Image (cartoon, rainbow, N blue to C red):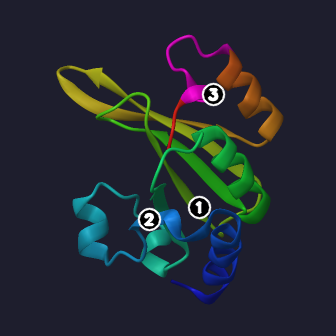
Amino acid sequence: IEENVGKKWQKLIDLYGTGIIITSGYRCHTHNARVGGSNQSLHKNGKAVDFIMAGRHNAFQVFTEACKIFSRVGLYQSTNNPMSAYIHVDIGEKGTWWLSYPITSGGKIKRVYAYYKSLSNLAKAIQEDKQRDWLNITI
């Protein structure tokens, strides 16, 4: 992991202890393509981390804390369990936050991404979403 990511990561560990489990850190180009990562993925530069947590934490609360530390944060609803999530953090362009959730289209599961330049707009979208219970999803 790139040094600046490591320093920010330590702040998250200081908040939550050692119960944070990295599910994806640095990715080589081949692995990034295999898992469906973007060609511009910051994982390929060691500037991004995906994680879950041991135990159950409110995903939106963890997301909110991560937003105070990292410049970009994404909250991903699990494909397998709609009441579970994981979080992506990186040190890319400041002020980008997003929600991602799976949908079934043509018999295949695809991922939808909704990007927000304001956390208040993201929070409003979460409250208005009638399909997903973002405020009660756990990580």
Label of residue 135 in the image: 3
Label of residue 28 in the image: none
Residue 107 belongs to magenta span = no
Judged left or right of residue 129, residue 106 is: left
Q: Mark 1 points at which residue?
A: 89
Q: Which amino acid does label 3 sit on?
A: Leu
Give the image location of residue 56, x and y in percent.
50, 44
**Disc number lying in front (2 or 1):** 2
Label of residue 21 in the image: 2
**Upstream in the sequence, badge 1 or badge 3?**
1
Residue 111 lies in quadrant: top left
At 48% across and 80% down in the image, what residue appears?
45
Judged left or right of residue 9, residue 30 is: left
- Which element type, helix, strand or loop, lies under badge 2? strand
Q: Please say whether residue 40 is visible from this viewpoint.
A: no
Category of crowding for the residue at label 2, using alpha-carbon neighbours closer than 10 angstroms: few (below 14), some (14–19), many (at least 20): few
Q: What residue type is labelled 1?
A: Val
Which residue is at the far bottom?
3
> Of 82 and 105, which appears nearest the observer?
82
Category of crowding for the residue at label 1, using alpha-carbon neighbours closer than 10 angstroms: few (below 14), some (14–19), many (at least 20): many
Q: What residue type is labelled 2?
A: Ile
The segment highlighted magenta reads: 128-136
At 68% across and 43% down in the image, what residue appears?
61
Give the image location of residue 91, x and y in percent.
66, 70
Give the image location of residue 69, x and y in percent.
75, 64
**Upstream in the sequence, badge 2 or badge 1?**
2
Mark 2 touching mark 3, by CB under 8 A? no
Category of crowding for the residue at label 3, using alpha-carbon neighbours closer than 10 angstroms: few (below 14), some (14–19), many (at least 20): some
- Which element type, helix, strand or loop, lies under badge 3? helix
**Upstream in the sequence, badge 2 or badge 3?**
2
> Of 85 and 49, which appears nearest the observer?
85
